[in-house]
Amino acid sequence: MHHVHEETDGFRILPDGTRPRRATSSGAASFSGWSGRPWRSGRSPARIDGGACPSALRAEEALPPAFWGTPSGLACLDAVVSDVWATGYGHHITRLMVLSNLATLLGISPREITDWFWVAYTDAYDWVVEPNVLGMGTFALGDLFTTKPYVSGAAYIDRMSDYCQACRFSPKKDCPITSLYWAFLDRNESLLGENPRLSMPMRSLARRGERRKHDRRVHDWVQRSLAKGSSLRPEDRPPDGH
Ligand code: SF4
């Protein structure tokens, strides 16, 4: 991690010679969308290098208020976010399995979620946060670090944690994260369809047939609701049916 970060000047110059766009703002991770006030008062410096903005999957959504503490209705996300704001820390797996996973599934800008990690964690260091979130967590650097995006549906979260026991959604029946997972594969089929490590999920995606439309509807519902700070409820979930 450290070596690649150093050699690429924090991913400002990638090994193939491309130079991702650089952020020119202070990297507030949509703080003002949640709080209604600017990240900092006073004048900003005229020139800011806010870090590289690679996005191999062309994700560019804003970070929803749920990451700043507005309840999302997803027990896993709300518990992890609450713990992070209480302690400034979180286990590696919750960073990947819940926070980065959700951000990737929702198509959040990799720069935004990386900036959020900068703000939220007490152990944030340049060479740790940038490679871990841009490289491993969000697949923003393509296969420079990992061979496939680190994404999962509810079954994996249920198997690896006890968050689902406190959730209004059921990981086996109506958890929207599973629909987000399929909608993610559907949306990125042209970019990820040839990835050999995704051949099995892509075959399963093809077998979903008309259910893919429903996955997209659930994705749109989750994204719209979280963007305006609403909490998700099972009774509001788009009904099954093609
Ligand atoms: S049911 Fe889904 S949203 Fe709820 S805690 Fe489990 S994985 Fe998270």
Image (cartoon, helix red, strand yellow):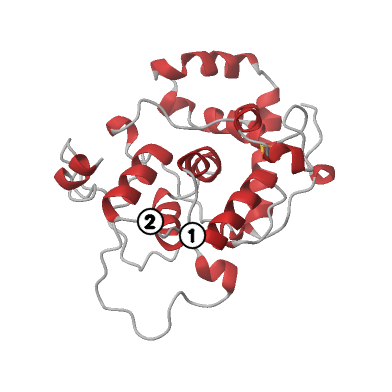
Disc nearer the start of the sequence (2/1): 1
Residue named by callout 1: 88
Res 138 visible: no
Tags 2 and 1 in contact by the CB under 8 Å rule? yes
Image quarter for residue 65? bottom right
Q: Which mark is residue 123?
A: 2
Quote the CA–CA distance across marks 2 and 1.
8 Å
Q: Is residue 156 left or right of residue 112?
A: right
> What is the quadrant of the C terminus in the image?
top right
Mark 2 crowd level (few <14, some 14–19, many ≥20, 10 Å Cα): few
| Residue at x-position 42% and y-position 40% | 137
Q: Amino acid at mark 1?
A: Gly
| Residue at x-position 39% and y-position 59% | 118
Q: Is residue 227 above or below residue 101?
A: below
Q: Is residue 97 left or right of residue 47?
A: right
Res 212 visible: yes
Picture coordinates of residue 190, whole percent (x, y): 44, 26
Image quarter for residue 240? top right
